[in-house]
Image: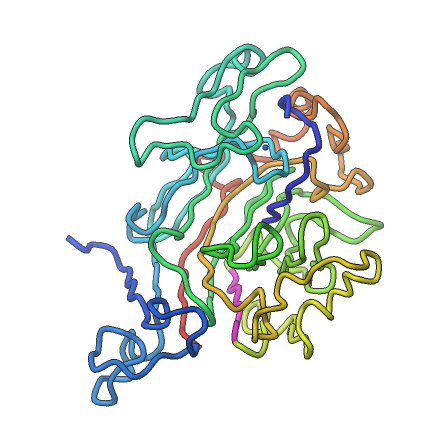
Amino acid sequence: MVESKTLQLAGVAIFSMAVTIAIVVPCTLLIPDDAPAVAAVSPSCSEYPCDSSCDMSAAPCNGLIFEETFDVLDLRTWQHEITMGGGGNWEFQYYVNNRSNSYVRDNTLYIKPTLTADKFGEPFLSSGTIDLWGSSPADLCTGNSFYGCSRTGNGANYLNPIQSARIRSVNSFAFKYGRIVVVAKMPIGDWIWPAIWMLPKYNDYGQWPASGEIDIVESRGNVNLTDGGVSKGNDNMGMTLHWGPYFPLNGYPKTTVETHDTFATEFHEYEVDWSEEAIIFKVDGTVLREISPPEGFWKFGEFEIDNPGIENPWANSPNRMAPFDQQFHILINVAVGGTNGFFPDSWTNSPYPKPWVNTSPTAFKDFYDAKDSWYPTWKADENNGEGAAMQVKSIRVWAN
């Protein structure tokens, strides 16, 4: 999920343990970042790596350091982000902690977008105020950037017309090097943007994208979206690394891969195998891309060719995988639309074209005014609208 820092104006006036979950903090998370990736053997059987006398077939001694199978939505593990900021992408949703948008049923997490007008009425979009500042630690706005905590709509700049959810493990679990496997199904519905991804816990190398981003799976919910005849709709997904000295210098075109399959109609297994030597992207066990720059990401990115004299943010790191040599946490969200280019103006959508352009100062309004063209594809009246939800069955992380 791209965390761009564009200042482009668009839309708003300028984005009991009944749980089958085991979170065992590995020793590697408790040692300095410059220490070896694997710490000395622990004398216990409750931390990885374990004493040799332990049962190596059981977690965490088998390397399984995180397991979530969604018996419940455990808010001790998953913190809801509460913001309208959209990560700088000027997405059309705002994120809240609400069981209409994030809930668990039958060992499956659902992240489902809904209409803001369902809660407040349509006139609210052009005249109301959304205030997310909150008044208690669990209810505080988590992102003030890009007018993320309070906005007021008007006739040209509508309020965020979609309500959705984004959850993260930053306060409960982060890891450095490991194999993460996610079993999930993507949503169906025009202009829906689901993502399961990772961000650094501490931004050791500076602001995005200097400290990196790992996109485990990202797709678009559109039914018929193409680029020169190539499908970019819900049968298409991508896995990507974002990295660079500063925005907009981002080397992601060199570290991305896409493929096609039944991602929105069936569950698939998305895997990132991350080590000191490489990052490997897999879907259903098939390797799609291995990224292992022999001289590090700075030389791989060739940033100085067009920007002579810029500084290398990873120069003092001894690891050639920098910035991907620090702790990362997990994020799960469903966004909608946006003006950063994830939905390019040049692509073709049928039977109705894209209802906004990325340079429009009234993109939120343009999008919502075309509701009759895109909202039927969400099928809100079928199965509680869950076809438009991203569904996640499990997340597991093994230490490398």
Residue 338 visible within the image:
yes
As rendered, which of 270 and 33 lies closer to the eye? 33
Q: Which residues are magenta?
A: 268-275
Residue shown at the point (52%, 72%) measured from the top left: 273
Is 347 left, or right, of 311 in this rendering? Answer: right
As rendered, which of 236 and 351 lies closer to the eye? 236
Q: Is residue 228 above or below residue 272?
A: above
Residue 381 visible within the image:
no
Q: Is residue 78 above or below residue 100?
A: below
Q: Is residue 388 above or below residue 245?
A: above
Quadrant housing residue 9: top right
Residue shown at the point (47%, 49%) measured from the top left: 332
Residue 383, how many percent across, how many down?
A: 45, 38
Residue shown at the point (56%, 24%) measured from the top left: 161
Is 58 left, or right, of 154 in this rendering? Answer: left
Q: Provide the major secondary structure of the magenta segment.
A: strand
Q: Residue furthest bottom?
A: 52
